[in-house]
Image (tube, helix red, strand yellow):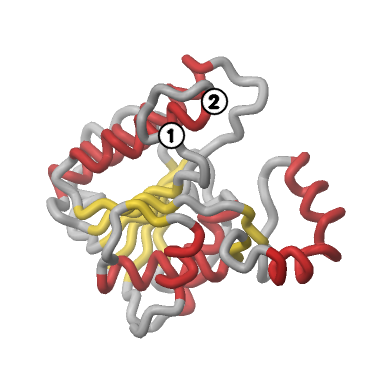
Amino acid sequence: MKVLIFGATGMVGQGALRECLRDDRVERVVTVGRTATGIRDAKLLEIVHRDLLSYSGMEESLKGFDACFYCMGVTSAGMKELDYDRVTYGFAVAAGEMLSHVNPQMKFIYVSGSGTDSSEQGRVMWARVKGRTENALLRLPLDAYMFRPGFIEPMDGIQSKTASYRLFYSLGKPFLPVLRRMLPNQVLSTREIGQAMLNVARHGFEKRVLEPKDIRSASGQVA
């Protein structure tokens, strides 16, 4: 299987990349983003691409993939809706539209978030934008799945790029075992999300929109 990862330097993207590199059935991994991960591996190729709204001239480089894990995203804190929409909706749909032409019917997994508003009409800005993005991707000629994780536990030395998140995770780490016991279907690890992505890429899933409980189920799916 050949896998394309957008946003491999983020927390979820790092987890997805790690699981791909560890899986012998993944023969090739290509990452796309504004910065490289710096990881060295024989089956990894990194493409540094600055303009995430346009992929003109890159069709051949991004052709022939079985799956795409779109893990790119930013926090909405302090952002105006227009700017957040450009980065969230604009970047994701630009990638999806391009891939739907060069890899029709590929598995496309978009990492959204728990609480996303599919109606696009709610009062929470980020949830509306994420909902609009999900809906647009589901309309494309791709075999698309929306992942909506809730609380994410970073594992295997993975850290968030956002300083406030790193502080939060550092302070909250002692309470994670309790939180997992209290809310077993709301806390997912980066490892579980990466494994779920690979299983959905291979086998599909009964739902197009996966909430935390569904992602956990997919991570344990028989491969």
Comparing 8 with 175, the one in front is 175
Pick out the residue farthest to the front: 182
**In x, y percent, where is residue 206?**
27, 65
SS for callout 1: loop
**Mark identifier at residue 124:** 2
Note whether 90 is above or below 181 in the view shown: above
- Work out whether residue 20 can be spotted: no
- Work out whether residue 219 can be spotted: yes
Three-letter code for the amino acid on which mark 2 is drawn: Val
Comparing 217 with 139, the one in front is 217
Mark 2 and mark 1 lie on one chain; the one further toward the N terminus is: 1
Label 2: few (<14), some or many (≥20) within 10 Å? few
Label 1: few (<14), some or many (≥20) within 10 Å? many
Quadrant of res 189:
bottom right
Say which residue appears at 35% left-offset and 52% top-offset. 209
Position of 82 with respect to 89 (left or right) is right
Q: State the CA–CA distance, disc 2 to disc 1.
A: 8 Å
**In x, y percent, where is residue 103?**
16, 52
**In x, y percent, where is residue 26?**
34, 75
Q: Quarter of the image for the N terminus: give it.
A: bottom left
**In x, y percent, where is residue 122?**
46, 24
Say which residue appears at 71% left-offset and 71% top-offset. 181
Say which residue appears at 41% left-offset and 38% top-offset. 49
Note whether 74 is above or below 24 in the view shown: above
Q: Are marks 2 and 1 in contact (CB under 8 Å)?
A: yes
Comparing 46 with 193, the one in front is 193
Q: Quarter of the image for the C terminus: give it.
A: bottom left
Query: Which residue is labeled 1 in the image?
Result: 117
Three-letter code for the amino acid on which mark 1 is drawn: Asp
**Mark identifier at residue 132:** none
Say which residue appears at 45% left-offset and 44% top-offset. 112
Quadrant of res 178:
bottom right
